[in-house]
Amino acid sequence: MKIGIGADHRGAPAAKLLADKFRREGHEVHVYGECSGASCDYPESAYLVGSAVNAGKIERGILICGTGIGMSIAANKVKGVRAAVAHDELTAGLSRSHNNANVLCLSADLLGQRLIEKISETFLATEFEGGRHARRVEKISAIERGIEPSSIQ
């Protein structure tokens, strides 16, 4: 799978370890943004990863900052992105199966490296269920296009 990973300065160490892990497992990993140990702003990485998802350059994105919240807010501003904050494997799986999330946002401050890896593995392995959820995801896309979601059947 083609995966994009981005982080701010608080998430950079976890993101590097995650990128190395997924490369070892045979995934094509692209790292977006580089803090080089200095403070850097999460909206920049969120934009780069979100844009790569929207352009089809990567299949899924993973963003790591202090809480995951800032990354999620910023990434969701990019057209075509459905970014979800997950703090466990259940919410990561549901973000995929029910919401067809294409970007996972994680907390470097609240999650240890092993949990970051397990949550990310679940996110990558879970498929979108479709069915009744497809209509709801289409309504999310309608909102993005400025269309009243209740007009979507």
Image: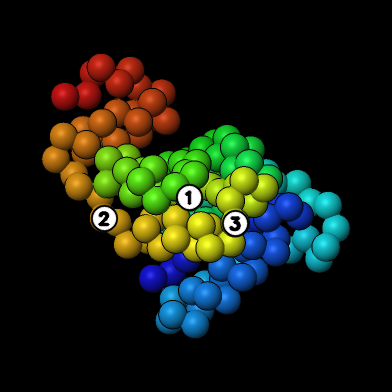
Residue pictured at 64% horizontal, 51% vertical: 108
Q: Is residue 101 above or below residue 123?
A: above
Q: 151 or 25: which is nearer to us?
A: 25
Badge 3 vs badge 2, beta-carbon distance below 8 Å: no
Mark drawn on residue 127: 2
Q: Residue 131: image x %, image y %? A: 14, 40
Q: 28 or 14: which is nearer to us?
A: 14
Residue pictured at 68% horizontal, 55% vertical: 11
In the picture, residue 124 is in which quadrant? bottom left
Query: Dot 2: what SS?
Result: loop
Query: Dot 1: what SS?
Result: strand
Q: Determine whether, in the image, residue 108 is placed left or right of residue 132.
A: right
- To which residue does mark 1 refer? 104
Residue pictured at 26% horizontal, 31% vertical: 136
| Mark 2 closeness class: few <14, some 14–19, many ≥20 residues within 10 Å | some
Q: Residue 88: image x %, image y %? A: 44, 47
- The kind of residue on which mark 1 rests is Leu
Inter-mark Cα distance, 3 to 2: 25 Å
Residue pictured at 42% horizontal, 30% vertical: 144
Q: Residue 69: image x %, image y %? A: 59, 37
User: Is residue 91 visible to the viewer in this orientation of the structure?
Assistant: yes
Inter-mark Cα distance, 1 to 3: 16 Å
Q: 74 or 108: which is nearer to us?
A: 108
- To which residue does mark 3 refer? 112
User: Is residue 32 visible to the viewer in this orientation of the structure?
Assistant: no
Q: How is the image coloured?
A: rainbow
Give the tally of numbered discs. Answer: 3
